[in-house]
């Protein structure tokens, strides 16, 4: 018989309708057994990742790429964890891993597909929730695999200071592109220009006319758009794309809390400008993770890539941190620290 | 001094606003000299092609893939012509060609880029306005190059009995796909099923709910959508696409006469289903024309591909024939016969 441990959890208490609120989640005191079935691992969660896609699983809807969460159960999402006990041959006590875990202190992980062992600990461990995890792979796949960027091309990134956008911009600069980002505050715009090395950046909240803003920064048009936002900004981008432009559709955060998403009226641009617009989900590309690490780890160590995180302290702060994503309260990748070791 | 010949023309008399009307065009009696500058050819026009894209050049707008026509000048578009006189080394009197020509009896063609010499006359000459011309290449490029079809995949084609759609359907059947088309009359639906060999077809005018119609014919979803229509039908298709679906965006005929195109509200499907949506213009792919002919000429001669044309007699009938495209009055490829030889 295993020992019972106290286990605080953030559970989904009611499905999201319209806007996400902290009251959709609640803190629950539970227990977990240290005894584990064959092939499973028991982990202590260290860092949790707040990702916009989670809202889709917090709605009681069909047709999202992953099914809805069950009411009363912990939110599950990406995190960095330490193995406390393992009955799986590939993992042993003390191993660090990243992958899907629970929003709780301890999680029993039965299905280890999509879990990655962390071999390189020369970098901040929290990076495996972002730069070296799902967000980093998303930036890498969306930019390099889908957009086939070439030196000298013009790149626009929305939600550019976020977990993914800040990396896309740096990848684009390393490729020799001209890079402009949009974000929602002066502080973020400063980050884009001064910390991430974007050529230009603007605060979309200060622009009356997105079309005019894009024309100002892209007088000759946009070759590559990394789409994180959707709606009216996408419409303005379509009008400013160049011939043979490419759009990697990564997210549409402006739309997730709307009852009825905004309509995009100018898709004819796809034809007249021969644009390729492609949606993707990073799960389909994890076979490229070793190749990604090979590229990005040296860049981090040589200080050629930087990463900004917004760190919320304690599991209790997770609901508020997640809610903050949708109003853009976070500056950089939103991480929750459950424990530091 | 060359001889002056009478030359009837269909000219653009005023720019299109909203719907195309016959009164946007008028018949003009003009003359043309038989003398020609160096490098040009004088042709007698035999067949003219009515194509939906023409409406874009009949509006006084910027940003279309080709500029607006000039008022008072003949409409220019695809046609089949006979060379009457040539000062270009590649062409001689009597040659048959297809490419961009004028909506008139005789045209002086100064720029011969994009003009193709017709070598195979074992097939109806009018086919070079459609099956063996721009429409055929459009079907070929959009289906094979953009959609990478595989045997057993499900294919939906809108405006399926038109110049392009009827061929896409036959290419898809030859590839071993399950093929459904939509069209706007019982007669066209019958053609799709009984002449072109589509597995299923429906009359969109009889469907209250496009979503329900698509679910009926594609209970497991659509792998490939060949888009000719846009608007509400595109929205319904997006909701019924399968994972990793591909959409070749060829046209959006339902939108061309609207002052404000309809909004598409469910582009999030691009992400959740990892859909690639790509617009194209056949002009970019004419280097594949020989490869296309190599495939399609034997198929025609072995009766493995059939083609339906709607033939309007006489240059005077061209305006009405073009207008008819937008209400779907034509059955099959709309051709205008100016002269038979």
Image: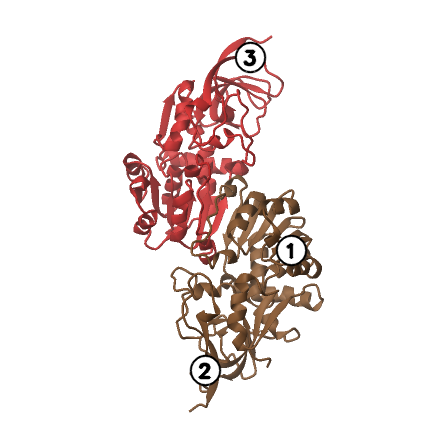
Chain colours: A brown, B red
Q: Is mark 1 on a helix, strand or loop?
A: helix
User: In the image, which is nearer the foreground, mark 3 or mark 2?
Assistant: 2
Q: Where is residue B234 in the image (x, y as percent from the top left)?
A: 41, 46
Q: Do the residues labelled 1 and 2 touch (CB within 8 Å)?
A: no
Instruction: In the rendered structure, find residue B220 and report the number of the disc placed on it.
Output: none
Give the residue displayed 54% in from the left and 69% down from the top. Answer: A321
Which quadrant would the N terminus of chain B be assigned to in this image?
top right
Residue at image mark 3? B34
> Residues under labels 3 and 1: Cα distance?
57 Å
Give the residue displayed 66% in from the left and 75% down from the top. Answer: A122
Whether residue B103 is visible to the viewer of this picture, yes or no, is: yes
Which quadrant would the C terminus of chain B be assigned to in this image?
top left
* Of callouts 1 and 2, the N-terminal one: 2
Q: What element carries label 3?
A: loop
Residue at image mark 1? A172
Q: Position of residue B299 (x, y in %)?
A: 39, 37
Chain under numbered label 2: A
Chain under numbered label 1: A
Q: Nearer the viewer, residue B24 or B135?
A: B24
Instruction: Please say if A115 is above or below B263.
Output: below
Give the residue displayed 65% in from the left and 73% down from the top. Answer: A123
Residue at image mark 2? A29
The 10 Å Cα crowd at callout 2, few under 14, some 14 to 19, many 20 or more, is few
User: In the image, which is nearer the foreground, mark 3 or mark 1?
Assistant: 1
In the rendered structure, the answer to whether residue B264 lies left or right of residue B93 reads left
Chain under numbered label 3: B
Q: Where is residue B300 in the image (x, y as percent from the top left)?
A: 38, 34
Q: Which of B19 and A127 is in front in this view?
A: B19
In the rendered structure, the answer to whether residue B165 lies left or right of residue A126 reads left
User: In the image, which is nearer the foreground, mark 1 or mark 2?
Assistant: 2
């Amino acid at each position: 018989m295993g020992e019972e441990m106290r286990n605080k959890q953030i559970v989904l208490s009611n499905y999201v309708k319209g806007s996400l609120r902290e009251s959709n989640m609640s803190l629950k005191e539970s227990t977990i057994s240290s005894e584990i079935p064959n092939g499973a691992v028991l982990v202590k969660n260290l860092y949790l990742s707040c990702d916009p896609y989670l809202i889709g699983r917090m709605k009681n809807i069909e047709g999202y790429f992953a099914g809805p969460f069950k009411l009363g159960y912990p939110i599950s999402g990406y995190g960095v964890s330490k193995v406390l006990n393992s009955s799986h041959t590939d993992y042993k006590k003390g191993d660090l891993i990243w992958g899907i875990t629970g929003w709780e202190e301890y999680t029993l992980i039965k299905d280890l597909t999509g879990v990655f062992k962390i071999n390189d600990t020369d970098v901040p461990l929290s990076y495996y929730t972002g730069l070296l995890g799902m967000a980093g792979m998303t930036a890498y796949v969306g930019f390099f695999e889908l957009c086939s960027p070439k030196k000298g091309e013009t790149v626009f990134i929305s939600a550019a200071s976020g977990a993914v956008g800040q990396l896309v911009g740096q990848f684009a600069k390393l490729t020799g592109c001209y890079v402009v980002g949009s974000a929602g505050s002066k502080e973020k715009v400063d980050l884009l220009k001064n910390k991430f090395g974007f050529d230009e950046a603007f605060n979309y909240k200060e622009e009356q006319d997105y079309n005019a803003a894009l024309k100002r920064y892209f007088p000759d048009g946009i070759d590559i758009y990394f789409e994180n936002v959707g709606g009216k900004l996408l419409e303005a981008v379509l009008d400013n794309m160049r011939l043979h432009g490419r759009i990697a559709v990564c997210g549409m955060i402006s739309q997730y809390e709307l009852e009825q998403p905004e309509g995009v009226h100018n898709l004819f641009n796809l034809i007249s400008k021969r644009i390729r617009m492609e949606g993707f989900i990073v799960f389909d590309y994890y076979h490229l993770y070793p190749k990604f690490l090979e590229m990005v780890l040296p860049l981090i160590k040589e200080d050629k890539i930087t990463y900004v995180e917004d760190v919320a302290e304690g599991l209790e702060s997770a609901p508020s941190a997640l809610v903050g994503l949708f109003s853009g309260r976070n500056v950089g990748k939103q991480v929750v620290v459950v424990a530091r070791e």
